[in-house]
Amino acid sequence: MLQVSVIRENREKIVEGLKKKHFDKAALVVDQIIEVDDLRKTTQGQLDALLSESNKASKSVGEMMKQGRTAEAEVLKAQVSASKEQEKELKAKLDQAGADLENLLLSVPNMPHDSVPYGKTPEENEVYRDWTGDFPKLYEGALPHWELARKYDVFDLELGVKITGAGFPVYKGKGAKLQRALIAFFLDEAEKAGYTEILPPHVVNEASGRATGQLPDKEGQMYHIGIDDLYLIPTAEVPITNLYRDTILEEKEFPVKLCGYTPCFRREAGSYGAHVRGLNRLHQFDKVEIVRLEHPAKSYDALMEMLEHVAGLLDKLELPYRILRLCGGDMSFSSALTFDFEVYSAAQERWLEVSSVSNFETFQSNRMKLRYRDENKKTILAHTLNGSALALARIVAALLENNQTPDGIQIPAALQPYTRFAMI
């Protein structure tokens, strides 16, 4: 959530920046925010003045009664009583202005970083780092991963449909072991990079979803448990970042580096077609997430460090990849700057997104009241960042396809200590 003070001081820049995210109502909503904030401030001033006068009058009533000026005291007492009704009206007006202001602020996406390119579709994203190596050369008759799954019995989509529905695969045998190996590998690499592992709940309340920006923007993409008013998590970002909701850190505590493995649940409504076959688009998938809380002056250095961490994982898995800087129209509601990693799927001959790494600056921390205390004891909003390191489903798809041979599927050397086998 953008800060009102920032909006007021940088109106033109905010309106212009939000055009990158194709927030068509930017000028209108920004002006409404300023107008409602003015009303809130004016009402607060009126209420404060009225309360001050009432307090003075109440003291005067007491003094008059002591002095035996009963008639005068009763007149003033009646005036104080009448002002109580005005106080109630002003408090109600103030509460309504506060609620209106919050709702307006919640409707505004984060300001994109200056480096975010203009554009509306994924095709307009900028290639930040391209793949310069060789692509896998497959043997004649090579198969896409959903056919390899049948051939080697590593996962079963039909069984998932039977017990749950489409988009919930069942991993079997060495396919299940490959999942477990990747999770352990990613967590170990995160630990080596200084991240503390967290095993969070897999459901969150509305306050947590609102704090990280999933609500009210993405209700349709989240699974809602109506009877308990809880949500299945779309990513570990939500519960892990919310560990620090309503927290004031000391400046010396930066950086806070956390990681965690969770299943992720996404409704992905409206996703159909050949491009989402197999593991390409699921309702449930496993992911290791890295989360950082940073000093504002260091958050973009941290973002670059996170990029190199994810790149290092893909290098060790021997997967061709490229990095995209997302255009404004393809970014999330909450992000200020996002880089996507895509791995090349040799059998499908297409790029598959496997990670997003983002800096949210103060957007999430303002919603969740995550602050730090500087050397002057002033409290300042922290910056939050997160990234997939990595999402498993499409990694598994690429590993199966790119490493297939006539004799089976080879396991990258870095994973073999975790799988305890070299070939499927």
Image (cartoon, rainbow, N blue to C red):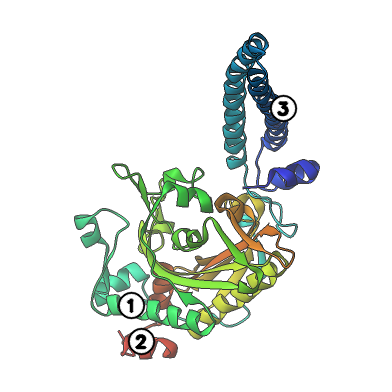
Q: Is residue 131 left or right of residue 412?
A: right
Q: Residue at x 69, y 38 (%)?
A: 26
Q: What's the amino acid at mark 1?
A: Arg
For residue 189, the mark is none
Residue hosting label 3: 49
Q: Earlier in the sequence, mark 2 or mark 3?
A: 3
Nearer to me, 220 or 323:
220
Q: Is label 1 in a helix, a strand or a loop?
A: helix
Q: Residue at x 62, y 53 (%)?
A: 363
Establish if 272 lies above or below 182: above
Q: Residue at x 24, y 73 (%)?
A: 172
Q: Residue at x 68, y 47 (%)?
A: 3
Q: What's the amino acid at mark 2?
A: Tyr
Q: CA distance from mark 2 to mark 1?
A: 8 Å
Report which quarter residue 305 is drawn in.
bottom right
Asked whether disc 2 touches disc 1, contact meaning CB atoms under 8 Å apart, the reply is yes
Q: Is residue 176 left or right of residue 255?
A: left
**Residue 291 position in % (x across, y down):** 53, 68
Q: Earlier in the sequence, mark 3 or mark 1?
A: 3
Asked whether disc 3 touches disc 1, contact meaning CB atoms under 8 Å apart, the reply is no
